[in-house]
Amino acid sequence: MNDLLSCARELQHLAHKLMYLGMDGESIYSDDFTRLNKEVLVESDSLFAAKSSGIEEEANLCLALLMGYNATIYDNGDKREKKQAVLDRIYNILKQLPPSLLKVRLLAFCYGEIYEESLLQEAYDIIDGWDKATLNSEQTEIIEELKNIEENPYPYCCID
């Protein structure tokens, strides 16, 4: 596995850890929360300008960046522009990416940003092709994540 792909997958792991911090019932300590937030933002910013060598590497990199920027509470004043640039990169590769778990993950996180129904439909079309009896933990997790994004559209919707 090349270095960029390894870094992208590590960022995905860190961002996931940050997004679900405390969900396992463990206590959240402010110094751990702060350190992890900073680590995710620094890693996201360091990978932002990286150039990938292939479609799968680009998809993993874009997924890592979108997850990283979504997970962290910090913003150096340019996070929204960076997220838009990542979404533009994803848009350019989605048509080339074959149906896969990686594509579903990209579609889910993009849907969580822009709530475009066609993204949700494409993700479910791919999921419908999976053998439900043999789903692995990553497939089960993204199905639950997609359902969660769909059912809880905050901050997309207005709350009265």
Image (tube, rainbow, N blue to C red):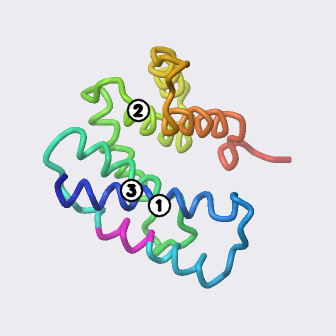
> What residue is disc 3 on?
65
Q: Position of residue 136 (x, y in %)?
A: 49, 33
**What residue occupies the far bottom of the structure in this picture?**
31
Q: CA distance from mark 2 to mark 3?
A: 17 Å
> What residue is disc 1 on?
69
Mark 2 is surrounded, within 10 Å at the Cα level, by few (under 14), some (14 to 19) or many (20 or more) other residues, namely some
Q: What residue is at 71 percent from the left and 41 percent from the top?
A: 152
- Quadrant in the picture for residue 102: top left
> What residue is disc 2 on?
101
Foreground label between 2 and 1: 2
Mark 3 is surrounded, within 10 Å at the Cα level, by few (under 14), some (14 to 19) or many (20 or more) other residues, namely many
Pointer 1 with pointer 3, Cβ within 8 A: yes
Q: Going by the image, does 33 lie left or right of 119?
A: right
- Of callouts 2 and 3, which one flags the residue occurring earlier in the amino acid sequence? 3
Q: Going by the image, does 92 lie left or right of 155?
A: left
Amino acid type at mark 1 = Tyr
